[in-house]
Image (cartoon, rainbow, N blue to C red):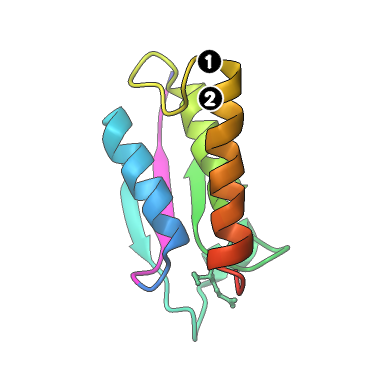
Amino acid sequence: MVNEVVFLSSWVSPFSMRIKIALAEKGIKYEYKEENLQDKSPLLLKMNPVYKKVPVLIHNGKPICESLIIVQYIDEVWKETCPLLPSDAYLRAQARFWADFIDKKVFEWG
Ligand code: GS8
């Protein structure tokens, strides 16, 4: 299977750190494209027409948006290497709770 991975991000984006860590843990090679959020690229507007935000992962030409959804996608597609969530369902629920808490209470502007 061809795995062409492009990561649209910005240095100011704390949400993008989730993707950087997930890609690093899985050892996935990717092309990084820095976005200027004051002057968004046509590629970002095309790949994330709903929110027009980074991060966006483009896998074999198909975009995945929203950092937690991207992390889950990476974990499902590259499932043989380094699982990102605990194998126990209860511990997985706890991990998801805290990720959701961070989005709602820490990064309320996101
Ligand atoms: C939040 C992404 C976000 O806010 C996620 O991916 O989890 N819920 C989303 N991205 C910001 C940069 S980080 O502050 C962004 O792209 N902002 C551009 C804009 O709002 O126009």
- Amino acid type at image mark 2: Leu
Front-most of residues 5 and 79: 79
Image location (x, y in percent) of residue 66: 60, 52
x 68%, y 66%: residue = 51
Residue furthest to the bottom: 38
The yes-or-no answer for disc 1 within 8 Å of ligand 1 is no
Q: Report crowding for label 2: few under 14, some 14 to 19, many 20 or more residues within 10 A (C-alpha).
A: few
Residue 28 visible from this viewpoint: no
Nearest the eye: 44 or 66: 66
Q: Residues within 10 Å of mark 1 (few under 14, many from 20)?
A: few
Contact flag, marks 2 and 1 (Cβ < 8 Å): yes
Residue 57 sits above or below residue 83 on the image? below
* Residue 88 makes an appearance in the image: yes
On screen, residue 8 above or below 79: below
**If the image is split into quadrants, where does the N terminus sit?**
top left
Name the spot of residue 31 as percent of width and height, x first. Answer: 32, 49
| CA–CA distance in space, label 2 to label 1 | 5 Å
- Measured as percent of width and height from the top left, residue 44 is found at 55, 65
Boundaries of the magenta span: 2-11
Classify mark 1: helix, strand or loop: loop
Could you say which disc has been placed on residue 88 in the image? 1
Q: Which residue is mark 2?
A: 91
Residue 25 falls in image quadrant? top left
The quadrant of the image that shows the C terminus is bottom right
Residue at 73%, 63% (x, y): give it: 50
In this view, the residue in front, 97 or 40, is 97
